[in-house]
Image: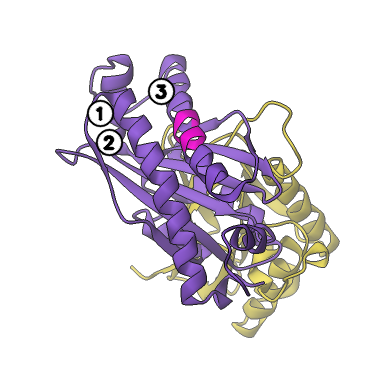
Chain colours: A purple, B yellow
């Protein structure tokens, strides 16, 4: 099944996944940062690769990306992207890092950001698991701080061999004063889409 | 200054003084081809090593093997001569470090290998190379003199 052929009902079901997962993850993030976190209504994008990158503000925007792969009957990957400005605040709250004009990440910072990715992915997947009766096993996260195009390009290659389009379920987290922003991407692998939709009770 | 932007899994050719740019190369490889005689240049931003292994290979610019051939063909139309074409390549990084790295994460390395293999098969010499590492690159290519400008976030800038 091609991503481009999804109908409204199927898209709504995927949005619901985003809603439930992100709701859980927002709560986790809120506890972690000790701040009130709002989340957006999830967006479902079925986009050519180049446009997925545009979504994040153009390919050479610097961002931090926490990435992990999820082993399951419906394999997928998760990418949590934090824009540079929010990253400063994240690190200030998490590890007490002083704000500086340019960001260099030390081991402590990297470890903290990996943990954030871990916690978010874990709570997202727990929700998804309860909803679908499937088991999900996330890998240990990896982290990169670099151009968003380079980071997303690496992740999107997973799809490259079967499609020119990627399905992206995106949730945006916002702290009350809109300082902390993060984009959570759930990227089901091409074959996983049918399985997920079936478990959600959407008939083809 | 006229600069043509090449996206991911995309390619373009031009004639000097036009330049070519591609941003955010991670594990993808940017293949720059040029003929200084006619000042015709081409840039392909490939994502994957091999079109013959793929279920979906409509987009020639996505794969190392087909993208090189396609770029050369387009350059010939603009007046380039095959025997005078040289190459410079950049990219092929590994953005994420996983323990027990699987082949899917080694994709940058595989891309670079495939690009080199296919350039060699076509007898095109690689004049400069900036590949590997774990960082992204933005490259600007000038077919006037074959200069390749490479910009990174944490590793500085250079011209090869």
From the image, which quarter does the C terminus of chain B lie in? top right
In this rendering, the label closer to the viewer, 1 or 3: 1
Number of other residues with Cα within 10 Å of mark 3, as a class: few under 14, some 14 to 19, many 20 or more: some
Check residue A78 for magenta coloring: no
At a point 69% along the width and 79% down the height, the residue shown is B73
- Compare marks 2 and 3 and give the one earlier in the sequence: 2
Q: Are marks 2 and 1 on the same chain?
A: yes
Work out whether disc 1 and disc 3 sit on a shared chain: yes
Q: Measured from the top left, where is residue B34 in percent x and y?
A: 61, 65
Residues in magenta?
A118-123
Name the residue beneath numbered marker 3.
A105
Chain identifier of the residue bearing label 1 in the image = A
Looking at the image, residue B67 lies above or below residue A116: below
Name the residue that disc number 1 marks: A89
User: What is the C-alpha distance between the residues marked 2 and 3?
Assistant: 14 Å
How crowded pointer 1 is (Cα within 10 Å; few <14, some 14-19, many 20+) is rated as some
Labelled disc at residue A179:
none
Tags 2 and 3 touching, CB below 8 Å: no
Q: Nearer the viewer, residue A158 or B10?
A: A158
The reply to whether discs 2 and 1 touch (Cβ–Cβ < 8 Å) is: yes
Is A119 colored magenta in this rendering? Answer: yes
Label 2 in the same subunit as label 3: yes
In x, y percent, where is residue A51?
Answer: 44, 65
Disc 2 secondary structure class: helix
Farthest residue to the bottom: give it: B77
Can residue A28 be seen? yes
Residue marked by disc 2:
A86
Left or right relative to A81: residue B53 = right
For the residue labelled by badge 1, is the local secondary structure a helix, a strand or a loop? helix
Give the spatial CA distance, label 1 vs label 3: 13 Å
Q: Residue at x 54, y 43 (%)?
A: A130
């Amino acid at each position: 099944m091609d991503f481009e052929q999804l109908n409204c009902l199927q898209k709504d079901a995927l949005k619901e996944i985003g809603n439930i997962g992100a709701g859980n993850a927002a709560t986790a993030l809120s506890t972690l940062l000790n701040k009130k976190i709002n989340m957006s209504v999830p967006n479902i994008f079925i986009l050519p690769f180049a446009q997925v990158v545009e979504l994040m503000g153009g390919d050479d925007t610097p961002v931090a990306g926490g990435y992990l792969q999820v082993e399951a009957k419906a394999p997928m990957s998760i990418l949590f992207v934090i824009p540079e400005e929010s990253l400063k605040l994240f690190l200030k709250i998490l590890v007490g890092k002083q704000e500086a004009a340019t960001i260099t990440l030390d081991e402590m910072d990297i470890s903290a950001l990996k943990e954030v990715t871990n916690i978010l992915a874990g709570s997202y997947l727990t929700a998804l698991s309860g909803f679908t009766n499937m088991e999900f096993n996330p890998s240990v996260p990896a982290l990169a701080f670099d151009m968003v195009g380079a980071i997303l390009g690496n992740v999107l290659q997973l799809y490259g061999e079967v499609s020119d389009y990627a399905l992206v379920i995106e949730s945006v987290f916002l702290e009350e004063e809109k300082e902390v922003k993060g984009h959570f991407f759930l990227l089901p692998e091409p074959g996983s889409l049918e399985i997920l939709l079936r478990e959600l009770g959407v008939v083809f | 200054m006229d600069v043509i932007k090449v996206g991911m899994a995309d390619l373009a050719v031009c004639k000097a003084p036009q330049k070519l740019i591609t941003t955010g190369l991670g594990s993808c490889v940017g293949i720059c081809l040029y003929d200084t005689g006619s000042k015709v240049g081409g840039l392909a931003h490939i994502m994957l090593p091999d079109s013959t292994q793929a279920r979906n290979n409509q987009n020639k610019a996505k794969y190392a093997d087909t993208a090189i051939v396609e770029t050369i063909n387009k350059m010939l139309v603009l007046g380039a001569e095959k025997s005078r074409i040289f190459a410079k390549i950049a990219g092929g990084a590994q953005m994420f470090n996983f323990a027990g790295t699987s082949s899917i994460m080694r994709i940058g390395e595989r891309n670079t290998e495939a690009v080199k293999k296919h350039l060699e098969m076509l007898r095109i010499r690689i004049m400069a190379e900036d590949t590997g590492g774990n960082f992204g690159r933005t490259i600007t290519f000038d077919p006037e003199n074959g200069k390749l400008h490479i910009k990174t976030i944490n590793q500085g800038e250079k011209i090869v």
